[in-house]
Image (cartoon, rainbow, N blue to C red):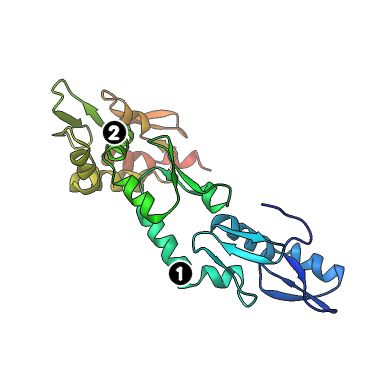
Amino acid sequence: MKTGLLFGIVANSKTRVRCVFCGVYIPKATKCIEEHTNGMKHKETIDLMSENGMSYYNDDELYCKPCNVYLSEEDSVASHLEGEEHANWIAAMDDLIEGEFINIDAYLATESEDVFCEVCNTKVTCTLQNIEEHVNDILHRSNVAEKLKPLNGIFPVENDDELWCKVCDEYIENTARSLLDHIDDDKQHVEWFMDIEDLIEGQEVSIQDYLKNEHEKNAYCNKCQMQILCNSQSIEEHVNSEAHFNQFS
């Protein structure tokens, strides 16, 4: 995104200018303009634009790509983002891409018309309908399932019809739907992750090797440089131990 001292500043009258982004009027004096453009609010507003698909056209117009609208002179970036139309689009998009390994950063930065699906290694033209169709496609569901296996302690077995969940010590049907249902909805699986993640947050304890390696039994404390049996009781005892606590002092 273009930047500069006068970026977003347009003439309004003989005595004042207007910041298109912030929706405010500023005395037409270099010092006043510098104070505004160097201020926190102006910089935060430009960041919000790059995070929400908004861009600056024709040196005096704001355009919101997700909503496909040009903002009026009475609007500002903040007022538009607080509006129902934009909020609804963001909420719908977040709901569609949550857990789907779809990156929309380039689209929101107005650098591309597409989003990128990391598990399918493909671009998708960014409309809610296109993305909904993509995430429900059987190939995408299968790719997501494969991506999630090593993140959830799930491994193939000799019987190709089944998978083994190390976390739950349970066999599940070897289909994308069964795998995703187990990860999302199985009470034991969900509670195990909730308990462990709550214990290790901010503690520099890693469970990645435990989840990726079928035969690994331990978590690893990077702070204490030691292994811990990967279960709630052992990890809780470790993170609450004096030896571990002293590593942070």
Front label number (2 vs 1):
1
Quick one: 149 or 54, which is closer to the camera? Answer: 54
**Residue at the image position 36 percent from the left and 38 percent from the top:** 238
In the image, what residue type sits under mark 2?
Lys
SS assignment at label 2: helix
Depicted 129 relative to depicted 84: above or below: above
Residue at mark 2 to residue at mark 1: CA–CA distance: 37 Å
**Residue at the image position 79 percent from the left and 59 percent from the top:** 5
Count of marks, rendered view: 2
**Residue at the image position 42 percent from the left and 54 percent from the top:** 127
In the image, what residue type sits under mark 1?
Glu
Q: Quadrant of residue 26?
A: bottom right
SS assignment at label 1: helix
- Tag 1: Cα neighbours inside 10 Å, few (<14), some, or many (≥20)? few
Res. 51 mark: none
Is residue 171 visible to us here? no
**Residue holding disc 1:** 85
**Residue holding disc 2:** 149
Quick one: 212 or 125, which is closer to the camera? Answer: 125
Depicted 225 relative to depicted 55: above or below: above
